[in-house]
């Protein structure tokens, strides 16, 4: 099978594009509007992009009516957002918060989710989620697209605070991923969750794997350089 998006059709009953880039971590983003309304929505185009300082991004296509998503608007207008880890146990709530609703609707309340206060930013955290990043908005890159929903806002934020539940940690100080069971998006209407992991010894001799770990302190120590 071969196709060229927008030029040569794939001839399949379902578009395969999103099923080729998998699994994708979910950006379950909470924001607060200028009017004080809390918003919560999942985005399957989410990722961390660097670790020193830690920066994350989520991309939000326009709504079915051609408007910018509330999460984007709120993050820009208030300068803040929170990433909440989506897990298998919270899958139904994640799905509920994906519905396209009016800006005055509080998705926390609609999904029956308790809120936990953040420390450095205004948007609340999902209390039942085991891991959170409090973020300050850095920049939004708006990429024009085709159709009503094609245009996308890529929102970048600096992580200023990290919360990890004690129960989500192993005895040797690592996040217990199989226990947490992070939820991830596949293509179509499919999801998966991480229920096992394996370790490969690093082949990176320069920094000893500090970059893979994402540790600025270890990278500076092993490379013999100070942090600027």
Image: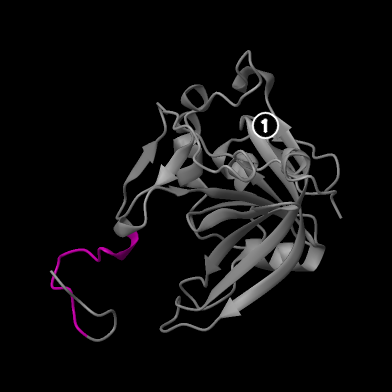
- Residue placed at 76% from the left, 52% from the top? 53
> In screen coordinates, is 52 left or right of 151?
right
Relative to the observer, which residue lies in front, 199 or 113? 199
| Disc 1, SS | loop
**Residue 109, can we see it?**
yes
Asked if residue 38 shows in the view, the reply is no
The image shows residue 136 at horizontal and vertical percentages of 78, 56
Reply yes or no: does residue 224 show up in magenta. Answer: no
Against 139, residue 157 (above or below) is above
**Viewed as shown, does residue 107 lie left or right of 37?**
left
Q: Which residues, given as a range, are shown in magenta?
A: 8-18
Name the spot of residue 77 as percent of width and height, x first.
Answer: 78, 68
Above or below: residue 203 compared with residue 122: above
Picture quarter with the N terminus: bottom left
Predominant secondary structure in magenta? Answer: loop
Dot 1 crowding, Cα within 10 Å, few <14, some 14–19, many 20+: some
Residue beneath label 1, please?
127
The quadrant in which residue 228 appears is bottom right
- Residue at 47% x, 29% y is 181
Is residue 96 shown left or right of residue 188?
A: right
In this view, the residue in front, 11 or 217, is 217
Residue 67 vs 159, above or below: the answer is below
Residue 224 position within the rendered picture, expressed as x and y whole percent measured from the top left: 79, 45
């Amino acid at each position: 099978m071969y196709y060229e998006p927008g030029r040569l059709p794939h001839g399949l009953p379902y578009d395969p594009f999103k099923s080729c880039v998998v699994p994708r971590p979910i950006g379950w983003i909470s924001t607060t509007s200028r009017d004080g309304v809390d918003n919560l929505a999942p985005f399957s185009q989410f990722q961390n992009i660097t670790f020193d300082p830690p920066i994350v991004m989520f991309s939000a296509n326009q709504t079915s009516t051609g408007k910018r998503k509330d999460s984007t608007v709120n993050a820009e207008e208030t300068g803040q957002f929170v990433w909440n880890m989506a897990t298998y146990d919270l899958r139904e709530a994640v799905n509920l918060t994906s519905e396209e609703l009016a800006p005055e609707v509080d998705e926390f309340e609609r999904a029956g989710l308790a809120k936990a206060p953040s420390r450095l930013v205004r948007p609340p955290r999902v209390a039942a989620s085991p891991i959170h990043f409090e973020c300050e908005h850095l920049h939004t890159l708006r990429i024009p697209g085709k159709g009503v929903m094609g245009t996308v806002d890529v929102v970048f934020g600096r992580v200023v605070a990290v919360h990890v539940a004690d129960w989500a940690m192993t005895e040797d100080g690592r996040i217990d991923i199989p226990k947490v069971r992070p939820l991830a998006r596949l293509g179509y209407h499919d999801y998966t969750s991480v229920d096992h992991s394996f370790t490969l010894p690093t082949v990176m001799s320069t920094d000893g794997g500090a970059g893979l770990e994402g540790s600025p302190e270890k990278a500076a120590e092993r490379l013999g350089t100070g942090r600027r």
